[in-house]
Image (tube, rainbow, N blue to C red):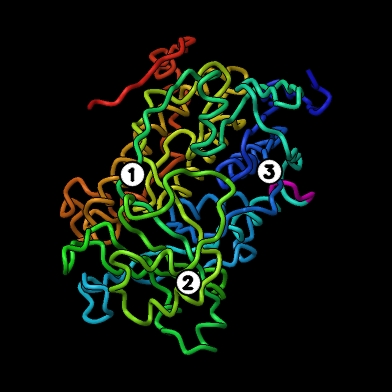
Amino acid sequence: MDSSLYSSSSPSTFKQLKVAVVGGGIGGLSAAVSLRRTGHIVMIFERRSFDVEVGASLSAAANGIQWLLEWGIDISIMRSVALDKFVAVKNCFIRGSVVRYVKIPADAVFYRKDMHQGLLHTAISEEGKGVPCKIVTDHRSYTGTVTFKNGRSVTADIIVGAGGIRLFQVCVRKEIGIIPCIQPAPRTCYRCHVSAEDVRRLGLAEYSLEPAIQFWGGFAGENGRSKYYKVVLTPCSDGDIVAFYCFLPSEETNHHTEAFEFKEVSPEEILQGSFKELDSGCVDFLKNSFERMPWRMYLHEPYEYWHKAKACLLGGAAHPMMPHQSQGACQAIEDAAALGIIFSDKYGFTNDVEAGLALYEKIRRERATRIQDASSRAMEDLNERIGFTNVDPNDPTAAGDKLTHNEMNEYKMHDQSLSRSALTVSLRRLKVVVRAPQTFCCLS
């Protein structure tokens, strides 16, 4: 075991832990920054180099942004765009009467590459609180004990599985014991981008530069068009890029598998089926776009548990969800924040890692699973989308069981971390046991 990769000192009441984060995406880097700020030694293992990060927009509500600020990250380096509204256009694709217009509080849109670079810079920078994290690339995990296919093994006090849904191919089955139940989603997507410079130079629809998330379609339309046809449009990267997502029924796409090495598709491939009904301005967008990449989607049954012994799951590895609530990144950030709080010097869990991970699961799993379920519901009904559910901001019960901005943004993580006496009681109920591998299956 290559224990020389870590060095640590251990104060009498706070034990500095060696943390191995498997996966260097948004969730993995967030966990690294959170645990670095708490005082731990963190190594991040990534199967690829970071110069192949996927370009896409990421919406982040205040429940995610607050942790970036608490970790001392300079948000300006992430080049976000502050949003002020959601707009739903009439369910024919022609831009005309607006059927929904909702003011939204404190949301922002990031270009994924910008957010990733900001987190990576913070994780490894010599500046800021904590020991800079170490990055090891070209390591593909072979087992969840952080043994890699190149034969290298690393010991750690905590193993954080943060490799997204693909983590299941390697770590989870052998270390955590979960066999996920996965079904192809009935809706899939093409991610596309247009430069703001081209929008202005070519006279494309300038409303695309507005600080808004715009929804076109999403309901059953004329000529029997499926409700799964939807276009989502938003600016990102300091307004230099307009990102848009073309959703459609899965059976009408040429892509039925997902892998890291997708090739860019032609506009003609996307402009098939009912997308031929698109407004001419949106067609012009598509024809002048770049990074037109297919995005295959899958529905995952919630997992009964997230941790075993000293290993835990985080972000998409713990609660893979559809993108229709724009909460995937925020929930990964919240997971990372919970680990940082629990393994801080405020509590004694650095001397009882398994109990700390049990508390992490207790705090996070119910909320994340609720959002995971709501994300699937919003695929079937756009009225389930956060923002459109805020019927009356003065009456939090008006939305029924639907998610609202209040529920997302007023979540107080520190309040969830309880007092020491309450923790003592809780942990008696959370007696950690080693779980045997378990198979989950779907109901037919």
Q: Please check the rendered image and state whether residue 198 is part of the magenta-colored stretch, yes or no.
A: no
Q: Can residue 392 be seen in this view?
A: no
Judge by depth and name the residue closer to the eye, 70 or 275: 275
Residue 346: % across, % down: 57, 31
Q: Residue at x 51, y 45 (%)?
A: 333
The answer to whether the residues at label 2 and label 3 have Cβ atoms under 8 Å apart is: no
Instruction: Please give left or right for residue 130 compared with residue 423 in the image.
Output: right
Tell me which segment is drawn in magenta: 122-126
Nearer to us of marks 2 and 3 is 3
Residue 18: % across, % down: 70, 27
Q: Main secondary structure of the magenta part?
A: helix
Q: In this view, does 428 lie above or below 232?
A: above
Judge by depth and name the residue closer to the eye, 291 or 131: 291
Binning the other alpha carbons within 10 Å of mark 1 as few (below 14), some (14 to 19) or many (20 upward) gives some
Question: What mark, if any, has residue 48 been given in the picture?
Answer: 3
Instruction: Please give left or right for residue 349 compared with residue 304 in the image.
Output: right
Q: Is mark 1 on a helix, strand or loop?
A: loop
The answer to whether the residues at label 3 and label 1 have Cβ atoms under 8 Å apart is: no
